[in-house]
Amino acid sequence: MSAAEDVLFELLHMEIVKTFTDSKDKDDAASKLEYIGFTTGYRFVERATRETNRFKDELDIMKYICKVFWVSVFKKEIDNLRTNHQGVYVLNDNNFRFLTRISSGKQYLQYAPRFVTFTCGLIRGSLANLGINCVVTAEVSHLPACKFQVQVQRG
Amino acid sequence: MSRQNLRAIDPKKVSGELFTLTYGSLVAQLLKDYENVEEVNRQLERIGYNIGMRLIEDFLARANPGRCYDFRDTADKIQQAFKLYLGVSPSIGSWSPGGDEFSVVLDPNPLTEFVELPDHLQNLRYSNVLPGVIRGAAEMVQIEVLASFIADSLKGDNITEIRVKFVKRLEDAVPAGED
């Protein structure tokens, strides 16, 4: 059983998703969810890293996100991190917490995107605060696994 | 990894901050979406109500609190739930003579740790999700209550106080023809 405060966070996330996908102008839902994640991540990582040593490089920051950051938010590490060393990072979470309450299989796959958008923003906001501008997208092909792709914007 | 100092941070505190910040971002977005502060208050209460309806299930499974025999029992369980989920122990008091109304005093209010209200938002009930959670959770155990803020330290009051009033017991509704 997960800790009590994690259940509360999960329920809050669920309600945030519902609030914006049910609202009148639901076309904006994705960008609003992403933005809520962005501002949360931006401020959260600022507090979380105040005692941390300076990061060596971009890869060092990505490792921090996959290990320390992911554990503090989702209570597990990212299962797999890949990079092409040219600014593209792929983070695989085989059991992404916001998707574990959805029945696996194909039936509800179409609803998966709305449950990962907040987290895309969360990653983008955290990286922005650590000095990396990027675009974050997510892909879900088998519930409850999720693949986040980070594309660093240079220049 | 060389970042051993990070492990010293209390995970409970980290989760709490994450919750507080996420909630703050939600309120900020709602304020952008609705011009009307009253509507934001209403939305926050509704979100709380929906959370409460689900949270009660987790509370019953986790804390195994047993049955409430009177409204004082209910107050104790609400206090217990605040401790469990938000890590704060509110004090319960100011009972009405009839025993059907009490106050939950939050000191501190974990939701407002990083918050200051600007002057033009003095009508915003920032933490309105909390009375919503109480109402939603109570309804799922057949108690209808009214819950609302009567004092808020964000607005310059000394304390943050939620007033909870017993309305009625809800009877199980049996579909017509199936009694």
Image: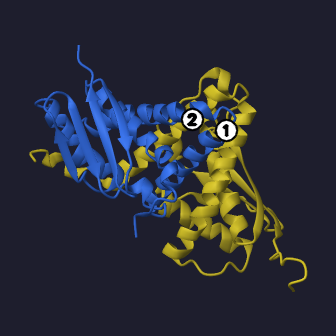
Instruction: Give the drawing colour for chain A.
Output: blue
Q: Quadrant of the N terminus of chain A?
A: bottom left
B46 lies above or below A26: below
Secondary structure, mark 1, is loop
Q: Residue A112 at what x, y percent from top left?
A: 47, 50
What amino acid is labelled 1 in the image? Ser
Residue A23, numbered label = 1
Quadrant containing the C terminus of chain A in the rendered view: top left
Q: In this structure image, what is the colour of chain B?
A: yellow
Task: Tell me if residue B108 can be seen.
Answer: no
Left or right of A60: which side holds B123?
right
Q: Residues within 10 Å of mark 1 (few under 14, many from 20)?
A: few
Q: Amino acid at mark 2?
A: Ala
- Does B89 sit above or below residue B32? below
Q: Residue at x 68, y 47 (%)?
A: B45
Mark drawn on residue A29: 2
Kindly identify which chain the residue marked by label 1 belongs to.
A
Q: Quadrant of residue B178?
A: bottom right
Q: Residue at x 28, y 45 (%)?
A: A69
Residue in the image at 54% along x and 51% along y: A14
